[in-house]
Structures are given as C-alpha cells and as structure tokens.
Image (spheres, helix red, strand yellow):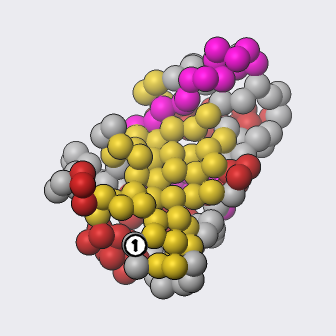
Amino acid sequence: MSPQQPRDPRQSHTWYLDEPRGETYRQLLRFAVGRVDRATLRPLGTVDPRYTHAINKLSPHQIGGPPASADVSDSESRRKRYVYRFGSDLANKLSELADGVFDWESPERPTDLVLLRGADDWLVSVAHERLCSITMAKDEFASLCSAVPSLGVQSGPGYRGGRR
C-alpha cells in the first residue's frame, strides 16, 4: 500500500502539537500507517546501552543511513539520519521503545523522530526543544483528530494557542 498523498500541496497546513504521549502517541503512530512511508531518527555518538538496544531493535526496518553497528561519533556520520521503512511493525516497535515523541532524545535513544510521506515531512519532532508539528490537508487533520481524540493542538489553522 503506498502512502496517501495530499490532493494539492498548497492545501497542506502545519499544526503544532502538545507532546503525544502514552495512548495518544500509540494512536498517532497507528494513524500514520498507510499515510507515511518512512521514519527517520538522528544518530548521536553515544555508548549508552539503551541507545544500542533501540538501534538494534529498529535495524530490521532500516533502509538507509549509517549501519546500526556504525560508530557515529564523528560529525560526518551524525549528519546522516537513520531511515526506516514505516509500517505497522515499525509503529509497534517505536511505541515499545518510547512512550512519547520527546522520548526520542539522547543519550537513551537516537533523537528527533520524523515521519515522511514521499519527500514531505508529515510529523517532525525536535525532542530537546520540545517541538512537535504535523503537516497535512485540513480534511486529513480532521480525520486525525477523530482517530486520536486526546491529541493536544497548540496552534495551527483554526487554533490560537488553545485546545480543540
């Protein structure tokens, strides 16, 4: 199944979210299945065993970036991102390894989870800045809000710093 594409890129909008955590995070990942095709994480030079565990657990889904066993302590390797094929198996592993989007932070895990639809960002997180945004058409966002009713929206079309 190929990911759904927005009908017209000019119809895409960005919403900034409260951190999806717990069941909200798991529901968001399930909603993404069939809508996005890849996930990326940024490697960091670390020897933390929890980091190594996460990378090894995700490695069967890896389709690009440095090898799971690579030393990513040099600046060149850190510029590359781990790239994973996104589907229900990866969504399950991402939810097993973290309880929220901002849990993807060093030193325990690779950082900054991004979900991609084709060449476009769908979900972007910057864990150390506590930023999370999602970009899609308004009708898809309405479907997301129905599927994930506990999703907290900070701002975006139709929202001015409050909850939905």
Q: Nearer the viewer, residue 139 or 159?
A: 159
Residue 45 point in image, percent of width and height: 76, 25
- Residue 96 in sight in this render: no
Which residue is denoted by mark 1 in the rendering? 157
**Residue 100 placement (x, y as % from top left):** 64, 61
Instruction: Magenta stretch: give its range.
Output: 72-99
Instruction: Name the residue rendered at 30%, 40% in the picture.
Output: 118
Number of on-image labels = 1
Query: Picture quarter containing residue 30?
Result: bottom left
Q: Nearer the viewer, residue 110 or 137?
A: 137
147 in the magenta segment = no
Question: Helix, strand or loop at disc 1?
Answer: loop
Say which of 65 and 61 sits in front.
65
Residue type, label 1? Pro
Q: Is residue 79 magenta?
A: yes
Q: Residue furthest right?
A: 48
Residue 3 located left or right of residue 116: left
Using the rendered image of the protein, determine whether residue 136 is visible from the camera's viewpoint: yes
Establish if 22 lies above or below 68: below
Question: How crowded is the residue under tag 1: few (<14 C-alpha within 10 Å), some, or many (20+)?
Answer: few
Residue drawn at 70 percent across, 17 percent down? 75
Q: Residue at x 53, y 65 (%)?
A: 16
Across and down, in percent, residue 96 comes to 61, 55
Residue at x 62%, y 66% (from the top left corner): 19
Q: Position of residue 110 (x, y in %)?
A: 67, 38
Judged left or right of residue 9, residue 126 is right
